[in-house]
Amino acid sequence: MEEYPIEFFDNHIIAHIDGKSILIDTGSPISLGDCRSIQLLGNNYSLYSKCLNFSIDDISELLGKKVNVLLGGDILRDIYFYINCDKKIIQFSSEPLSINGEQILIVLENNVPTLDLQINGNNFKAFLDTGAKISYIDPEITSNYKSIGRANDFYPGLGRFQTNIYEVPITLGSYSFTIVAGNLPDILQMLSFILNSKVFLGNDIFKFFNVYFSYRDKKIVLVKKIQH
C-alpha cells in the first residue's frame, strides 16, 4: 500500500506524489500528464499527452493551479484507493482494503463509475465525478428548487462557464444529505443526453464522507466523516 497527502483546491482533489501534483478525476476515462508515465504500487502507467486537443497544461490554466497529471479511470480501474478527507490522505493498494462503511454498488461506463441515487423519491443514474467541484443536475430537476447563487467552473475543451446553483436533497444508500448542484452549459447537456444520465455527483460527497473505491469489486464504501 502507498499513502500520499491530498489537498482540496477550489474543491478539486490534488494528491502530492513524488514531487508531482496529481488531480484525481474519476469522471475522466483516461489519464493525462506532462510526463510519459506515472509509477504507482511498483507499476508504470502510461499517460496521454493530449485528449481532444487539450493537455494537462490547459487543465492547469483553467484550474488556476499547476498540476502534472490528471489521474483518470484507465488507471484507477486497476487499483484500490481510499480518499480519507479526515486525515487528508489518499491510499492506493494492489489488494482490497478493509474499510468499514456502507457499500454502494457501482457500474463502470467507459472507465467512469455510475451509481443509483434518489431525488425527491425518484431514482436516477449518476456519474461519480471527482473532477467536478460541484454536482450537475438536469435543469428539469433543479427547476423545482430555488437558486442560491452562481458558481464559476470549467470543462476541458469548452473553457470556463458560469451556472446557477441550487441546494438539492439526495439519498444515497441509507444516507440523505444536501448537495450543491449547477446546470451544465447547453452544449454539455447533449453529453448528458448521450450518456443517459441527468445527474453528475461531484465532490460534494466529500463534505460528508471519506470514500473507498473498488472498481474491480464494483463498489464504493462510504465512511461518515468525523467532521464536516
Image (spheres, rainbow, N blue to C red):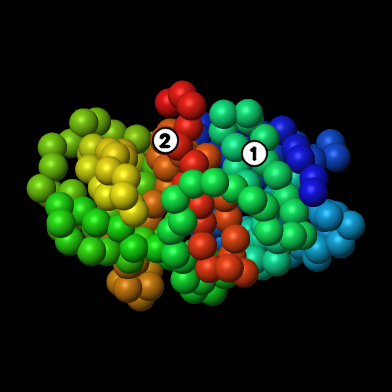
Which x, y percent locates residue 78? 70, 66
* Position above or below: 26 against 225: below
Which x, y percent locates residue 124? 27, 64
Which x, y percent locates residue 203? 46, 42
Q: Amino acid at mark 1?
A: Ile
- In terms of sequence position, does the residue under pointer 1 or pointer 2 come before the other? 1
Q: Secondary structure at mark 1?
A: strand
Residue at horizontal 72%, vertical 33%?
Answer: 5
Left or right position of 225 against 40: left
The number of numbered discs placed on residues in the rendered structure image is 2
Nearest to the observer: residue 107 or residue 189: 107
Quadrant position of residue 41 = bottom right
Q: Which residue is mark 1?
A: 14
Which label sits on residue 208? 2
Residue at the extreme left: 144
Count residues near mark 2 (Cα–Cα under 10 Å), then give few for <14, some for 14-19, many for 20+. many
Residue at horizontal 75%, vertical 45%?
Answer: 68
> Image quadrant for the C terminus?
top left
Distance between the alpha carbons at the discs numbered 1 and 2: 18 Å
